[in-house]
Image (spheres, grey):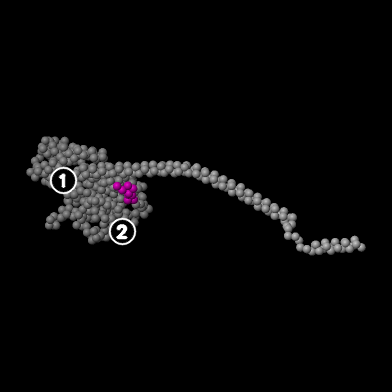
Amino acid sequence: MPDTKERHTAKAIQTEVSKKPPLLTPKLDEIKENETLVSSREQSYCMAEVVLKSNKSEEKSALDTFVSVIPVIISLALLAFTVYKYFSDRADQRRQEKNEKSKRRIESIQSAIQEFYLPFQQLREQSSILYGIFAVREKQAAKDNKTTFRTLKHLCSGEALSDPDKAILKEISDVSKKTLSLIDERGHMVDEAAVSSLLGKLAAHIRLLIVAAKGKLNGKEQEARNLVFPLEIDGAIHSNLMRLKERIDQLENPGKPAANVSNKSIIFYNENAISYAASSNKVDMNEVYRRVFGLLRLYDKQYGYVLDAGCGAGRDTKYFVRQGCKVTSFDASEALVSICKKYTYSFCKLDTFDTFSCTYDYDLVWANASLLHLKEEEFYAALKKLSSLMSPAHYSSNRNNLKSAGILYFSIKNISVNSICNPGERDFYQYPSVDVEKYLDEVLDLEKVDVWDSEGGRTEDPSSFKNYLYRKR
């Protein structure tokens, strides 16, 4: 049975072979997978190389673009700097031109002050002193007859003068000639038309006075009656001088803010300035003027320096200037200050009792119905401030006779206890007279001249007032 035996042998061999471990060579499918992986990696490497080459190309292109833009950027930067430098230089040039213009203006103003205004005031002061002791007997006779003595009219009448008066008249004529020469040579430095007109009237008066002093106008008494000395001239020149000094301060300190406060009372005056001014002008102040100027004349200061503190619309400022006084005014209401300035010969500034400052000692410090808007602390501080601005007292050599003294006048509403009135419109504060007088006497060392009551004089306000008239000791 060879076939059967052979079949068993072949089967055994096959079984043995199947029991042996597999060969180490990879299987076909594994080989194919590896080949696919290698191919994929190769493709990735190729793509990366392409991307890298593309990026390098883009970077080169961007760099080339940046390099090409650099000149444009530099050009624009240079252009921007050039434009900036141009406008900066122009601004510096304008500032320099403005500063130079301001400097020239300041020099021009200072020249006018030094060459005309101050010499004019000195000559007018000399003339005023000489007139004060001229024809004293004749002046008293005119006063007794309730008339006004006028030098030019008296000289034209041909009446004889005493020898002392003749000597004084000669000095007056010499000073007048110097004043006339100053007006002729430097009067052009006055840039206010109205003031220039006053200078013209003064020059004409001086010329006639010089001729009359030589006795060449005798018999021209009637014609000379209307040739009145322009009393406003000293006040007008003073106001112009103050404006020039203020202008210098503005040029030297540009942007310097003006004193500016706001409260209920100031708002009221700003909103009702015109009607208030009209109402104020109707108030009869003659009795107060009479009392105050009587004291000024006693000290021969009727043409002196006056501070109108809280001047309102300028009613009293105008009166003082027309009497020959040199007046400085201030108020906290911008609208009222504007109205006061409309009077050409006035000098008025926006200021308060707290911030006002000056370089003068005033013969009269006047605060009519203006302190009554101040609270207690402000009220007494204002009185202290005003008293410090009064000219000092001058006595004779033995101190037995008071020759002159600064005068303080003010008025407040007249009640017996502190209170506030009309809280809906303005604040009014009133203080007991006994407290006010005690403060003036014991703290400020002022001497009482007179204290009296008066009616307010306004139909819309029936309040009565307490008036205080004091002087330096």
Question: Main SS type for the magenta part?
Answer: loop
Identify which residue, 415 or 376, lies in the foreground: 376
The residue singled out by tag 2 in the image is 377
Q: x and y percent of residue 313 in the render?
A: 30, 46
Q: Which residue is drawn at 64% across and 51% down?
A: 44
Asked if residue 278 can be seen in this view, the reply is no
Which-is-in-front pick, marks 2 and 1? Answer: 1
Q: x and y percent of residue 394 in the render?
A: 17, 54
Range of magenta residues:
252-260
- Residue 280, above or below 416: above
Q: Earlier in the sequence, mark 2 or mark 1?
A: 1
Please, which residue is most extreme toward the left here? 163
Tag on residue 126? 1
SS at badge 2: helix
Q: x and y percent of residue 322 in the render?
A: 23, 44
Magenta run includes residue 254: yes
Gap between marks 2 and 1 measured at Cα: 43 Å
- Residue 391, above or below 175: below
Q: x and y percent of residue 268 in the render?
A: 35, 49
Residue 13: quadrant of the picture = bottom right
Which of the image's four quarters has the N terminus?
Answer: bottom right
Q: Which amino acid does label 2 sit on?
A: Glu
- Residue 30, above or below 135: below
